[in-house]
Image (spheres, rainbow, N blue to C red):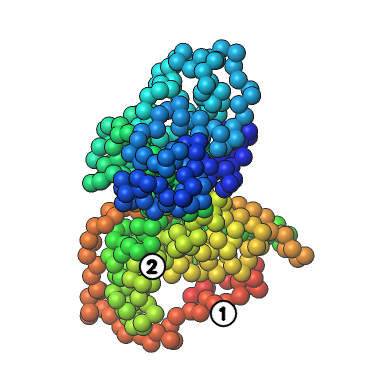
Amino acid sequence: MKIIKGGAIKIALSTLMLLIVLSNVVFAGGEFRDINLSSDYAKESIIELAANSIIKGDENGYFKPANTVRRGEMITMIVRALEVDTNDLPDVATFKDVPTNHWAFKYVEAAHREGIVKGISPDEFGVDLESTREQMAAMFVRALGITDNYNEAKPHFEGLVDKDLVSYWAIEEVEAALATGLMQGVENNRFAPQGAAKREQVAVIIHRFIKNRDDLLAEVKHPHLYATLEKYSNLQYKGEINTILAFAMTDLVEEFSFIMEMEEKNIINGINLHSMGEFKILDSEGEGIVEEYEMIIMGNKLYIRDFEEDIWTLLEDDEIILKDGNIEGYVIGRDLYENYNDFNIEYAGEVVINDESTSKYVIQLSKDEALGLMPGDNLEMLKLLMDDLYNDDLYYIFEIYINENYEIIKLSYTFNGTMIDEEEMLEVELLLQMYFNNIGQEIEIKEPDPSKVVVFDFDDFIFDFEDFDFEDFDFDNFDFDNME
């Protein structure tokens, strides 16, 4: 992550600990005489920072926690702490209230150049004005360079009861400060953006950053996506999922190819599932099989429909139950949420899907990462085939689309590549798209007509994909016409 544009600033813990110097004299005792005047939430931060000489009081040992920091003072402290280059300055002052002979000139100009601070107008900085909470948020967030990921949905800002009081220029910074935990509201879901920035509040922010530096900078990445994944990690999914799969493989040496296509509709209601679709396997001549399928899961009961005989086969087994009774296996694996900071995620803008605006995120995945994220159960055959055939150094593109209600609207997996070994040269194309509709709705799933149900032994029926060797399978001589 680029901390501040221009590459002139070195951010290290030693300098961040000196982010704001509130006075020029340290009180020798390490604790201030007026510590009891501090708010309860700030006392621990003030005491610890004072003990480590990070914040200082006046010559009489007073911290004055309720005093307001002025804009010139705050930006001077930030520039000094972050070692911003103050030599490359304009000959003419940018702001009329900070002329070239002003004590804060070089600090204001350097901060303005690096994008840390803006004026209250094009030609006025407001150097002696008291800093507000939204200004404090803007200065800290811009100085840390964590605003780039907040051009999307802003759940923390939208949840504020006083969001209308936040200046338009500070919205992204307030969202970033709240999302990372760098700042918190005052009470009753209020941020008080126009409230005074107090010395004790500054102390809390410094202390919070020092204690939680890694978490603060890690969790800043795409909060809309992270909040959605957190929600889905413990969600009993209800609604519809429409899946489209297209998988093609061509042996460039033997000049043989086959195509696998699937269109599927799933209705999910907690641990119950109704799935129906069409499955195709075609050779290079366009010949092969086209099969309809339908199944119903009710608790530990699995019903599979036989279209030719117009009957349902019933299998009962405890392993049938949807994993944890929740969304895993039918929307997205938990790996992305549990290992969120290990993935390289890019925000790709807003995309309209079925007249609904969504935020699009793109992730490049290794084979193991793709298998971990790809929904299991209903795509187990494809996953096993990929694991058996694909090289470990090939990559996949995963896309996730989320609406403003933190709902996944679409997932997409794509892969195009050529795999070469001593005997084969395989060209592979994969497209898997999943669309989610009627999210959260209770859609009734009924068991089949009992008069058309035949009970079958589960152990004798299920094909063991794990023992099937896709690599040694002879696709060239396989008789697709007589496949059963």
Residue 84 picture location, percent across and down: 59, 32
Q: For residue 431, say whether it is visible.
A: no
Label 2 element class = strand
In the displayed structure image, the side of residue 344 where residue 278 appears, left or right: left
Question: x and y percent of residue 309 in the render?
Answer: 33, 76
Q: SS at mark 1?
A: helix
Which of 207 and 361 lies nearest the eye of the viewer?
207
Check if mark 1's residue and mark 2's residue have beta carbons within 8 Å: no
Q: Earlier in the sequence, mark 1 or mark 2?
A: 2
Q: Which residue is mark 2?
A: 293
Query: Which residue occupies 51% across, 14% down?
Result: 99
Type of amino acid under label 2: Tyr
Q: Nearer the viewer, residue 16 or 188?
A: 16
Residue 424 % position (x, y) = 72, 63
Q: Amino acid at mark 1?
A: Asp
Q: Position of residue 54 (x, y in %)?
A: 50, 46
Out of 143 and 356, give the one closest to the viewer.
143
State the residue position of label 1. 467
Q: Dot 2, crowdedness within 10 Å: few (<14), some or many (≥20)? A: some
Residue at (56, 12) in percent of width and height: 92
Q: Nearer the viewer, mark 1 or mark 2?
A: 1
For the residues labelled 1 and 2, the Cα–Cα distance comes to 23 Å
Q: Viewed as shown, does residue 150 lie left or right of 365?
A: left
Q: Which mark is residue 313?
A: none
Q: Residue at x 45, y 59 (%)?
A: 337
User: What residue is rendered at 54% in x and 26% in y?
Assistant: 107
Q: Quadrant of the N terminus?
A: top right
- The front one of 279 and 7 is 7
**How packed is label 1: few (under 14 Cα within 10 Å), some, or many (20 or more)?**
few
